[in-house]
Amino acid sequence: FIGRASSRNKGRMARYLANKCSIASRIDCFSERGSNAFGEKLREQVEERLDFYDKGVAPRKNIDVMKEAIEVSQKKDNDMDVDSEPDTTVKKSKKKKAKGEDAVPAEDGVEDA
């Protein structure tokens, strides 16, 4: 990103990128679940800032971008929670054989010894 900036904006871009990296590392450190939603949104912000320096296109506000990232992250968490819910179907338990019960039961219900 710094290399793509013009020579007079390299310092600005370096400072902006360092700030976004700092935010990303704090989010990574203090978040309970891993998510790349914040990283993707922060990267989009850096791209928008680069366009702002080159073309004058106004970037989005940080608060709006972070709200979007939170919504995306929560949606992914909810999707993961739905996928990871245990099956509520009844499972049949297997009966363990005792050591002398290897004989095949007879047809009339009496076992051979």
Image (cartoon, rainbow, N blue to C red):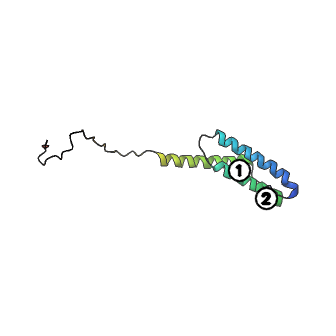
Left or right position of 41 against 32: right
Q: Nearer the viewer, residue 63 or 99?
A: 99
Left or right position of 63 against 101: right
Q: In which quadrant of the rendered image does the N terminus lie?
A: bottom right
Amino acid tagged 2 = Asp
Kindly state the secondary structure of the residue where label 1 is placed. helix
Left or right position of 81 against 58: left
Q: Residue 94, can we see it?
A: yes
Kindly state the secondary structure of the residue where label 2 is placed. helix
Q: Residue 57, can we see it?
A: no
Q: CA distance from mark 1 to mark 2?
A: 14 Å
List the single residue furthest toward the right: 8
* Residue under numbered circle 1: 42
Residue 44 x, y percent position in the rendering: 71, 54
* Residue under numbered circle 2: 51
On screen, residue 96 above or below 1: above
Amino acid tagged 1 = Leu
Q: Are marks 1 and 2 in contact (CB under 8 Å)?
A: no
Q: In which quadrant of the rendered image does the C terminus lie?
A: top left
Residue 32 x, y percent position in the rendering: 60, 40
- Within 10 Å of disc 1 (Cα), the crowding (few <14, some 14-19, many 20+) is many
Residue shown at 82%/60% (left/top)? 54
